[in-house]
Image (tube, rainbow, N blue to C red):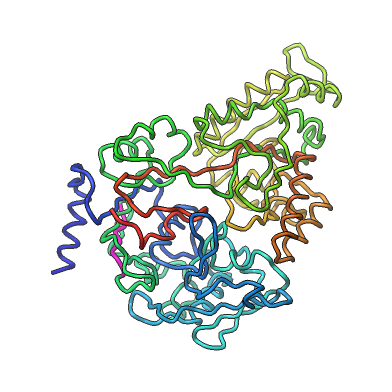
Amino acid sequence: MKRVLTMALIACVLAGCTKAGTIPGTLRIAIPLEPATLNPIMASNTTDAMVHAFIFDLLVTADEHGKLLPDLAQTVPTLRNGGISRDGLTITYHLRRNVRWHDGAPFTSKDVKFSWQAIMNPANDTPSRNGYDQVRSVDTPDDFTVVFHLKHRFAPAVTALFGESDSPTRILPEHLLGRYHDLNRVAFNNMPIGTGPFKVAEWVRGDHISLIPNDAYFMGAPKLKHIIIRVVPNENTAINELTTHEIDWMFQASPNTCRQLPHVPGSHVVYVEQNAYESIRFNLRRAPLDDVRVRRAITDAIDQKELVDTLTCGMQEIATEDHPAWMWAHDPSVKRHAFDLHEARRLLAQAGFTPGRDGILQKNGIRLSLAAVTNNGNLTRRQSAILVQAMLRKVGIDLQLRSYPGAQLFGAAGDGGILQLGKFDVMFGGWYAGLDPDDSAQYACTSIPPGGYDYTRYCNNDVGAAQEAALTHYDVPTRAQAYHRIERDLARDVPEDFLWWVKQAQPISNDLKGFAPNPVTPSWNSYQWSI
């Protein structure tokens, strides 16, 4: 009888019985794209990660301030408590003893080891193995102890391994999945069994996912009775549904909604600090961008404040370098180049450029024309490119704008990926990272494409030495000093023009209580939410 009533309420919610307003105990979420799978080791974007956090757990999570908290682990491993060995090569987790999978089976260390093996299994379509590939082996001396043996000292290990990383990956059940050669098409991916605060009741592809509470959750029974996650690709539709109280949370509103959302009755916007930024990347392998004077002239010609005010209603914070001001790795002494058209023109003249008949600069008969790329699915970036195009025209630079589908722009080199193959001069994009400030993926000689994410092709031996120090020392002061050195070198060499640090907008109903997103996963504490 209870299941019949539950399904009846879900049917009512989906049929449009929600226009009267909030449904006590039922949270309705609009997401812009549907997960491809509910298997957490195959998460490929922030929407996937948010949904998976309702169903599965990490070893270590974080609160709304970014402070690390134990999740499936009893404590967060540190050098002080012995969880990190003195040589930095071993990470030991002591697991909670009161955790059960949704089917009643006990959670044990075997599940953690199996999840690592599944991520590293080349037969599995896992988007990222970053961090997990730094592990040499995993031991399980008993059911509630897991020991990760690292190949070398790796400071981000605690956040990278089943923590709040840039790709937070959650633990899988070994007793259900251990027998499979690969996990790409198993039935589990559609109706998974997790340890999290909510269970999957129904997934109607292309429409909605229905969740019900896991009353046996180890942190306490959730307060919500139902969660309905609906696929709403159009932001205007999602805003209308928030206005008419057909949804209670519009997941990850883009900056383009900044003028509409403050006027939606019965709701407010929660802005979440993230380790993320929007920027303009320069391809240093392409002339004339191999000349730092040209790169610096471009940054001087761009009015960051105008971009932030126009595109984000002034809600985002103007950036200096990659690490936002709230992070311990940020160097407050680094200043952004001032908006200065006179200085931009002076630097371009010093680099040998003179005005052509049409006002565009030229050198040795070649016009200063740059190919700028971005992904056509991101309206903010397309609008940013148009504004910057007009700004650079004032100093004699011609910016030719081209937009591509995300799969083509960010694709692998073998698939013709524009960025991996370096088929661009300037790129409008961004970067979203986890709690750790590790930025070696973007600024290390070993990360230059194809195969890496150093799209600017920036290679600096001093930065490399600083990256080595930052990744092999576990103490914050030493790491902070290394990241300060990296930020100063980035400011000097200008491989990238950082526009703003991202504060993610999460519009929610005023009736939703307990919503306190951390910098990576907004649904980390969903068992505490109520409506």
Q: Residue 371 in the image: state x and y as whole percent.
A: 67, 32
Q: Residue 102 in the image: state x and y as whole percent.
A: 34, 74
Q: Residue furthest top?
A: 357
User: In the image, what residue occupies the spot 62% across and 47% down?
Assistant: 417
Between 178 and 494, which is closer to the camera in this rendering? Answer: 494
Q: Residue 527 in the image: state x and y as whole percent.
A: 36, 63
Find residue 228 and report its image quarter: bottom left
Residue 209 among magenta residues? yes
Q: Residue 176 in the image: state x and y as whole percent.
A: 40, 78
Q: Which residues are magenta?
A: 208-214
Residue 299 among magenta residues? no
Q: Residue furthest left?
A: 1
| Relative to 365, residue 27 above or below | below
Q: Residue furthest bottom?
A: 142
| Relative to 409, residue 110 above or below | below
Q: Viewed as shown, does residue 123 lie left or right of 90?
A: left
Report the number of discs. Answer: 0
Q: Viewed as shown, does residue 341 lie left or right of 251?
A: right
User: In the image, what residue occupies the spot 39% across and 42% down?
Assistant: 507
Q: Quadrant of the N terminus?
A: bottom left
Q: Which SS does the magenta portion mostly show? A: strand
